[in-house]
Amino acid sequence: EIVLTQSPGTLSLSPGERATLSCRARQSVRSSFLAWYQQKPGQAPRLLIYGASSRATGIPDRFSGSRSGTDFTLTISRLEPEDFAVYHCQYYGSSPPTFGQGTKVEIK
Amino acid sequence: QVQLQESGPGVVRPSGTLSLTCGVSGDSISSNNWWNWVRQPPGKGLEWIGEIYHTESTNYNPSLKSRVTMSVDKSKNQFSLKLTSVTAADTAVYYCARAAPGSSPFDSWGQGILVTVSS
């Protein structure tokens, strides 16, 4: 299975700042079947990005995703108050699909 | 808009069987989608448990395969999860989720249900 490592574990930023979250696959991945989810306390994950860089329906364009080899990045260009949450990456190009351990974006 | 809703006991005895159901509205369980279960232990990351198609075809996480059974009930538009021989390590929030066929992300999720394994 594909092991995903997210960094940092916690990101402390202020509203309006740029957030850069990393998700690294330990093995070579054959495709960009990488998704990002946002999860707020007490809520289910919400799909933000799929195919490494495509935004899901209704997701604001301040959220963007990219890939460089086995490194995937989620960027939030300007943090809004509602963006403070935990973000999970998922690789769904093989079975079992796997998740990273999550990155918490907290208010500084 | 599809909605998924988990239901089942919130407490299960050690060595017992965890049984959950996911009711689906706004979509047919017989549509061209895979229906998944994912869990999240308190304070930890997400773990995929398995998936089922309306034809009863299943795929399970190898780490749980020996203890997992999934089924569908087309008449009630729902699908179910059974996890046997549970221990405290199975305490988690259990989510059901939908995915399109092929390699696809989970585009809709239930709100989740906390299941605690305790005597």
Image (cartoon, helix red, strand yellow):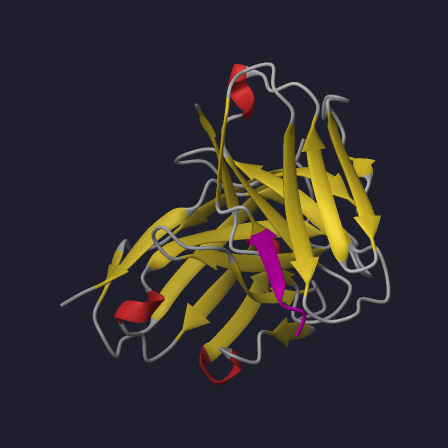
Between residue A64 and residue B102, name the one nearer to us.
Answer: A64
Q: Is residue B73 above or below residue A50?
A: below
Position in image of residue B25 (x %, y %): 60, 39
Whether residue B107 is visible, yes or no, is: no
Between residue B45 and residue A24, name the one nearer to us.
Answer: A24
Position in image of residue B1 (x %, y %): 67, 31
Q: Is residue A69 above or below residue B108?
A: below
Position in image of residue A5 (x %, y %): 59, 59
Q: Which residues are magenta?
A: A1-6
Horizontal arrangement in the rendering, residue A55 relative to residue B93 (left or right)? right
Residue sitting farthest toward the left: B119
Tell me the quarter of the image containing the N terminus of chain A.
bottom right
Residue sitting farthest toward the right: A31
Position in image of residue A98 (x %, y %): 62, 63
Horizontal arrangement in the rendering, residue A40 relative to residue B43 (left or right)? right
**Residue at the location (68% across, 68% down)?**
A26
Horizontal arrangement in the rendering, residue B97 relative to residue B86 (left or right)? right
- The answer to which quarter of the image holds residue B41 is bottom left
Q: Is residue A17 above or below residue B58?
A: above
Instruction: Please tell me whether residue A5 belongs to the stretch shown in magenta.
Output: yes
Residue sitting farthest toward the bottom: B66
**Residue at the location (78% across, 63% down)?**
A93
